[in-house]
């Protein structure tokens, strides 16, 4: 069973024998061809998964035991790879991100299905002694803060990673304190917003959005099996068409020009090496305006183009 967060396997005989693998624990996955332990040695597809948990590596091999020969060449595990790749590309919905490329020209890069509810300026990040002035962007999925002086100094905090929200006193005055979950690093983040009434309004808005998100979370993974099936069929059809050889797509070239040029060049060189050229003493070099430098005079019966062009400049097609 493939879900938006994990892969589930269970025994058909004993339901208590089951396995749940979260996509966040998968280190590598691919398909292999294995041979069943039978006299016929039937080849079938298998899904290989390498998972890591608490510095321990686990290797799993799930084999198709249906015995149907028509399934050997079909991507029966394609949905696993599709959903897993979607999970990898949508980490901003679930994971805390520091110093990411999430802001461009002072505007938040919006995720699919993300709605911006408010933009609060003049927010001090109290992570350092002097503090950093920046802005809040509150959406239905996350809370984003970025510095006004440097947009790359930012934090993207999904509501999924927020453990608690509260307003408490600090040495800078009333501050919004956010405790992240252990999966989000267990950070304690402090922000100051002036005046106090504005801080209380922001606290109520974030508390409400955090509660709503907890009831209806959005993990960012949207997979449509029908669309994926159509993409696979279109890719298979395109590959089949590309593999077909069509004479109309090719042109036969006339290589007589190439053979002629090569023949003249080889003959010129052969005459010089074999001493067939009559001795005329040392011939003074002459300036060649086509090439732009001095060269030995070309012997009678040859042209500069015959010796210079190793390949023909224009290939003609055969009719």
Image (cartoon, rainbow, N blue to C red):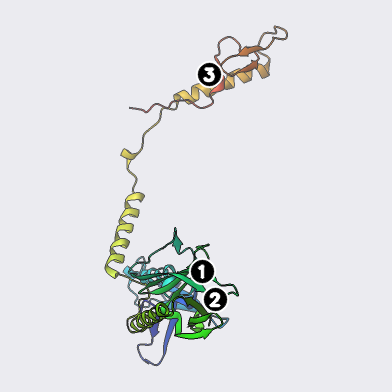
Name the residue beneath numbered marker 2. Answer: 126
Q: Is residue 104 above or below residue 280?
A: below
Q: Quadrant of residue 17?
A: bottom left
- Furthest residue in direction right, as rendered: 281
Mark nearest the camera among 1 and 3 is 1
Q: Position of residue 283 (x, y in %)?
A: 69, 9
Q: Secondary structure at mark 2?
A: loop
Q: Secondary structure at mark 1?
A: strand
Vertical relation: 96 (above or below) 258: below
3D distance between C-alphas at marks 3 and 2: 77 Å
Marks 2 and 1 close (CB-CB < 8 Å): no
Disc 2 residue crowd, few under 14, some 14–19, many 20+, Cα 10 Å: some
CA separation in Å, label 2 and label 1: 9 Å
**Closer to us: 82 or 276:** 82
Q: Position of residue 133 (x, y in %)?
A: 51, 69
- Tag 3 or tag 1, which sits nearer the N-term? 1
Task: Determine the image quadrant of residue 195.
Answer: bottom left
Q: Which residue is mark 1?
A: 133
Kindly report the distance in space between the C-alpha atoms of the residues bearing marks 1 and 3. Answer: 72 Å
* Residue 44, visible in the rendered structure: no
Position above or below: 142 against 277: below
- Residue 247 tag number: none
67 relative position to 255: left or right: left
Please provide percent x and percent y for residue 279.
70, 8
Residue designated by label 3? 305
N-terminal-most mark, 2 or 1? 2
């Amino acid at each position: 069973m493939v879900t938006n967060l994990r892969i589930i396997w269970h025994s058909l005989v004993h339901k208590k024998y089951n396995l749940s693998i979260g996509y966040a624990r998968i280190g590598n996955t691919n398909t292999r061809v294995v041979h069943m332990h039978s006299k016929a040695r039937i080849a079938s597809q298998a899904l290989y998964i390498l998972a890591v948990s608490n510095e321990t590596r686990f290797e799993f091999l799930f084999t198709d035991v249906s015995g149907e020969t028509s399934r050997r060449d079909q991507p029966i595990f394609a949905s696993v790879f599709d959903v897993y790749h979607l999970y990898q590309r949508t980490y901003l919905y679930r994971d805390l991100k520091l110093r990411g490329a999430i802001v461009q020209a002072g505007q938040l890069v919006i995720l699919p299905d993300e709605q911006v509810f408010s933009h609060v300026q003049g927010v001090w990040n109290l992570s350092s002694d002097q503090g950093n002035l920046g802005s809040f962007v509150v959406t239905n999925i996350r809370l984003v803060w970025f510095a006004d002086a440097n947009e790359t100094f930012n934090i993207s905090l999904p509501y999924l990673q927020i453990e608690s929200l509260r307003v408490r006193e600090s040495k800078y005055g009333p501050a919004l304190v956010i405790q992240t979950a252990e999966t989000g690093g267990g950070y304690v983040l402090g922000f100051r917003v002036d005046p106090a009434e504005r801080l209380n309004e922001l606290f109520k808005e974030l508390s409400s959005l955090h509660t709503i998100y907890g009831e209806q979370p959005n993990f960012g993974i949207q997979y449509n099996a029908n669309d994926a099936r159509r993409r696979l069929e279109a890719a298979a059809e395109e590959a089949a068409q590309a593999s077909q050889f069509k004479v109309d797509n090719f042109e036969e070239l006339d290589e007589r020009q190439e053979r002629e040029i090569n023949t003249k060049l080889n003959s010129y060189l052969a005459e010089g090496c074999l001493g067939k050229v009559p001795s005329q003493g040392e011939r003074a070099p002459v300036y060649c305006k086509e090439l732009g430098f001095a060269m030995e005079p070309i012997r009678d019966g040859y042209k500069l183009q015959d010796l210079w062009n190793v390949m023909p400049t224009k290939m003609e097609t055969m009719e």
